[in-house]
Amino acid sequence: EVLLEESGGGLVKPGGSLTLSCSGSGFSFRSYAMTWVRQAPGKGLQWVSSINSRSTNTFYADSVRGRFTVSRDNANNSLFLQLDSLRVEDTAVYFCARDGDYGDFDHWGLGTLVTVS
Amino acid sequence: SYDLSQPPSVSVSPGHNAGITCSGNQLGDKYTYWYQQRPGQSPVLVIYHDSKRPSGIPDRFSASKSGDTTTLTITGTQTMDEADYYCQAWDSGSVIFGGGTKLTLL
């Protein structure tokens, strides 16, 4: 069974930093691109960042480019998102998701809440 | 920036069919995807590549495309189908989600 588990969320002041982690199991983690998607309270889904399987390509939404950094450790089946210069509007549940074979996101974690206040 | 438009809400009586639309500029040229998100839960992929269902998704979920509008249809809706539904597409290397549609069973 594919499992994704996020951690690292919490309360941080504006301008502060946080690192989110996502642990994957039940599949060949190193074979899949991975993605972060966030959801502000009561709002819709917003793509944040993606990274390919070998970390050679990273992609960011305009709203986070230059402030967030995505990385991964395939040896430890882990995905990371470094959040710097945080703003109140970054408050959201952050989900990690596995990129499927067809441009979809076929498995999602439960999410971790980041509150900037 | 690229936008996908969905109606904020759709209501349907149990056992009836529900349709949720998603529209975008030149969406007909892009693959579209649909996710279901029940309250307090993570999104679940219900449709990929315009109209394909992942394993484990009931066949009452289907999708079709006409021009630049894609429609998710739930045939014979059940109580468990009450959820938010999001369409998704790719544009210029970025992932775009629609604003979401809340499906309410009357």
Image: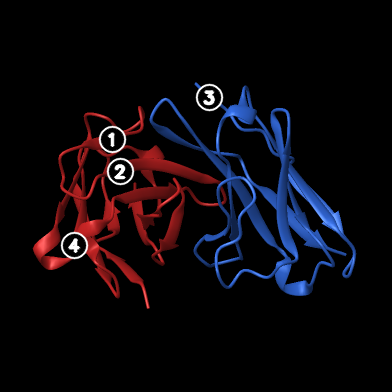
Chain colours: A red, B blue
Q: Are marks 1 and 2 in contact (CB under 8 Å)?
A: yes
Around disc 3, counting alpha carbons within 10 Å, would you say few (fewer than 14), some (14 to 19), or many (20 or more)? few
Q: Do the residues labelled 2 and 4 touch (CB within 8 Å)?
A: no
Q: Residue at (42%, 63%) from the top-left corner?
A: A107
Q: Do labels 2 and 4 share a chain?
A: yes
Name the residue that disc number 1 marks.
A59
**How far is disc 4 from disc 1 in space, using C-alphas?**
17 Å
Amino acid type of the residue that numbered disc 2 sits on in the rendered structure:
Ser
Looking at the rendered structure, the secondary structure element under dot 4 is strand
Looking at the rendered structure, the secondary structure element under dot 2 is strand
Q: What number is the disc on residue B38? A: none
**How far is disc 2 from disc 4 in space, using C-alphas?**
14 Å
Name the residue that disc number 2 marks.
A50
Q: Residue at (81%, 67%) from the top-left corner?
A: B77
Residue B102 location (% of width, % of height): 71, 53
**How far is disc 3 from disc 2 in space, using C-alphas?**
18 Å
Where is B59 relative to A13, above or below?
A: below
Q: Do labels 3 and 2 share a chain?
A: no
**How far is disc 1 from disc 3 in space, using C-alphas?**
16 Å
Q: Residue at (33%, 68%) from the top-left corner?
A: A4
Name the residue that disc number 4 marks.
A78
Given the image, what chain letter belongs to the residue carrying mark 2?
A
Name the residue that disc number 3 marks.
B2
Q: Compare marks 2 and 4 and give the one earlier in the sequence.
A: 2
Residue B90 location (% of width, % of height): 47, 34
Q: Compare marks 4 and 1 and give the one earlier in the sequence.
A: 1
Amino acid type of the residue that numbered disc 3 sits on in the rendered structure:
Tyr
Looking at the image, the residue that sits furthest to the bottom is A1
Given the image, what chain letter belongs to the residue carrying mark 3?
B
Residue A34 location (% of width, % of height): 30, 52
